[in-house]
Image (tube, coloured by chain):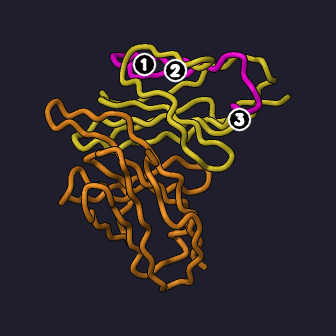
Chain colours: A yellow, B orange
Amino acid sequence: GIQVEQSPPDLILQEGANSTLRCNFSDSVNNLQWFHQNPWGQLINLFYIPSGTKQNGRLSATTVATERYSLLYISSSQTTDSGVYFCAVSGGSQGNLIFGKGTKLSVKP
Amino acid sequence: NAGVTQTPKFQVLKTGQSMTLQCAQDMNHNSMYWYRQDPGMGLRLIYYSASEGTTDKGEVPNGYNVSRLNKREFSLRLESAAPSQTSVYFCASSYYRTSGTSTDTQYFGPGTRLTVL
């Protein structure tokens, strides 16, 4: 099956700093999503981005499907950005997502 | 729209007890999924239902059964709970296009935190 690797596993930032999270996947995909899991455990959809570039406020994402990676950019980080960011992909015929292990982000005031 | 709802939010069971986790979605999605999340890990698929009337095993199906009750509801049953099933359980739904084999955004419920003693 498809393997999903995220890096870095942990990231500590000062408030206001920028960061880039990476997701590599081992095969072609027809779905790629980025999620933020907040400290209360809720999974929040950030982007549906099997290819191309999208932006939403301070967050943006780029997926280069031919090279099998996706990047999530967080600019001017805030303490509320803390949590775990997951990349998940689907390449099969039924749509189920395969998750990476996540990047744990801590933003310090 | 409530999106994806799950009940209960928390549950404590003793080894050997049974229970059913309930999930419902109001987005008219055809596909529904059950995942589990263990500490420090991403989510892993237990079972899924590509459409009403069908269910299939995912990566970690042992010890679980599912029922797609109708288009809105998809339940997960633990027949004889074990401590290894202590986890957070998430239900999700999406619209799956049979032509072109692609899915739209998958939406997740708030999760059920289950502890088996």
The amino acid on which the numbered mark 2 sits, given as a three-letter code, is Leu
**Element on which disc 3 rests:** loop
Per the image, is A72 magenta? yes
Report the span colored magenta. A60-81
Q: Earlier in the sequence, mark 1 or mark 2?
A: 1
Left or right placement of residue B101 versus residue B103 in this view: left
Per the image, is B106 magenta? no
The residue drawn where x is 41% and y is 75% is B78
**Element on which disc 2 rests:** strand
Which image quarter is the N terminus of chain B in? top left
Q: Earlier in the sequence, mark 3 or mark 1?
A: 1
Question: Mark 1 highlights which residue?
Answer: A63
Q: Which of marks 3 and 2 is nearer the N terminus?
A: 2
Residue A53 lies in quadrant: top left
The residue drawn where x is 69% and y is 31% is A81
x and y percent of residue A58 in the render?
Answer: 63, 17
Question: Mark 3 highlights which residue?
Answer: A82
Q: Which mark is residue A71?
A: 2
Residue furthest front in the image: B1
